[in-house]
Amino acid sequence: MKLDVLLPVKPFHLAKSRLADTLSPAAREALVRDGLRHTLDVLREVQQVGHTLVISADPLVWEIALSYGVDILEEVDVPGLNESLALGLRSLQQHGAEAVMILPVDLPRLNAQNLQGKINKLVSPGMVIVPDRHGDGTNLLLFAPPDLVPTAFGTGSFERHCALAQAAGVAPLILRCPDLGLDIDSPEDLALLAG
C-alpha cells in the first residue's frame, strides 16, 4: 500500500501562540522550525513512506521542505487546518495515494520505530488513531483510502475522528503511545519534555 504523508505547518511567526507567556517569539519559531526538521529527518528513515507533502503559507517553511526534497503546497493565506488538509488530500489523491498519514510537527519524541509500528497496523479500508496524552486531540492519523473521511482536527478531534471512521463503516484502531502522545502546546508539555 502506497503511504503518503501530509505535514501541515503554520507560518513560523504564528505558531505556538499558547506558549506566548513562556517563550519569546524567536523561541517559539525555533521550536516549530526544529520540529519540522526533526519530523522530516524521521520520515526519511521510515521505509513505508512514499510521497511527503508539506502544506504552509510560509516561505521559510517551503525553503526547509525543499531542502529535504519533499513537495510543498503553497497556500496564499492561512485557512483553517482542516481546510488546508482537504487541499492536501485532494493533491495526494491526484498523485495516486492509497493511504495517508497526517502528522503534526510538534512531536519531540517521534522516531522511526514508533511510526513504523503504527503504519504496519493500517489496513484498507481502515483508520489508525494515536490520541494526545490527554485523550482529546489527534497526534497521528492514518487512513486508507485517502477519501475515507474528512479531517476534524481541533479541540475534541480524537472523538470526532473515531465517529467519522464509524460513520464510514470502519472500526478505528486506537493506539495509545506515550512518545507520540506528547505534543508541545503548553508550559506543562515543555516541563514534561525537560523532565
Image (tube, rainbow, N blue to C red):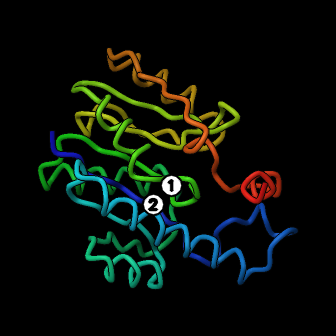
- Dot 1, crowdedness within 10 Å: few (<14), some or many (≥20)? some
**Which residue does the numbered mark 2 point to in the structure image?**
8
The quadrant the N terminus occupies is: top left
Q: Closer to us: mark 2 or mark 1?
A: 1
Residue at 54 percent across and 43 percent down: it is: 139
Question: Disc 2 residue type?
Answer: Pro
**Which one is nearer the viewer's eye here, 181 or 87?**
181
Residue placed furthest toward the right: 21
Q: In this view, does 136 lie above or below 183?
A: above
Question: Disc 1 residue type?
Answer: Pro
- Residue 86 image offset from top left, x and y in percent: 36, 50
- Residue 92 image offset from top left, x and y in percent: 22, 54
Q: Is residue 121 left or right of residue 15?
A: left
**Which residue does the numbered mark 1 point to in the structure image?**
104
What SS does tag 1 mark? Answer: loop
* CA–CA distance in space, label 2 to label 1: 7 Å
Mark 2 and mark 1 residues within 8 Å of each other at the beta carbon? yes
